[in-house]
Image (tube, helix red, strand yellow):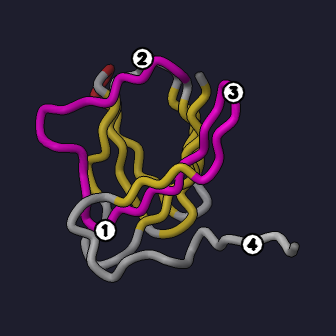
Amino acid sequence: MYPIIPNIFKNIPNQLPEELIECIFKQDNMHIERIVSKGHITPAGQWYDQDGDEWVMLLQGQATILYEQGNQSLHLIAGDYLLIPAHTRHRVEWTPPGLNTIWLAAHLH
């Protein structure tokens, strides 16, 4: 049997009424997601506050992340990555509406 070789840039629906979040790897204390945003942002008043660290890389597109503490805004372009420590409240403020923004996110538990 030959292994199946998935591609992070393929099988993305043309219409994305909601952000697409897919777990592509899971093991013990970590899981990795492919996230596709197309103009999607974190809903108003909502903050992510995760129990574990999250490492994210922007593979395609652009995004702006806002940290609650210090109201610090980070603009990401393809190739940028960052570590979001556990319990660092943050939100996605912007992704371009006409472009698939593709994230790789590793969640450490």
Mark 1–mark 4 contact, CB under 8 Å? Answer: no
Q: Secondary structure at mark 1?
A: loop
Residue topped by disc 2: 87
**In the rendered structure, which segment of residues is drawn in magenta?**
24-52
Q: Which badge, 3 or 4, is on the more N-terminal residue?
A: 4
- Per the model, the C-alpha gap separating discs 2 and 1 is 26 Å
Q: CA distance from mark 1 to mark 4?
A: 25 Å
Label 3 vs 1, first from the N-terminus: 3
| Residue named by callout 3 | 28
Which of labels 3 and 1 is toward the front? 3
Residue kind at label 1, given as amino acid type: Lys
Viewer-nearest of discs 1 and 4: 4
Where residue 31 sits in the image (x, y, percent)? 60, 38
In whole angstroms, how far apart are the C-alphas of marks 2 and 4?
35 Å
Q: Image point 74% across, 72% down: which residue?
A: 5
Q: Is residue 90 above or below residue 38?
A: above
Label tally? 4
Query: Secondary structure beneath disc 4?
Result: loop
Dot 1 or dot 4: first in sequence order is 4
Dividing the image into 4 quarters, which one contains the N terminus? Answer: bottom right
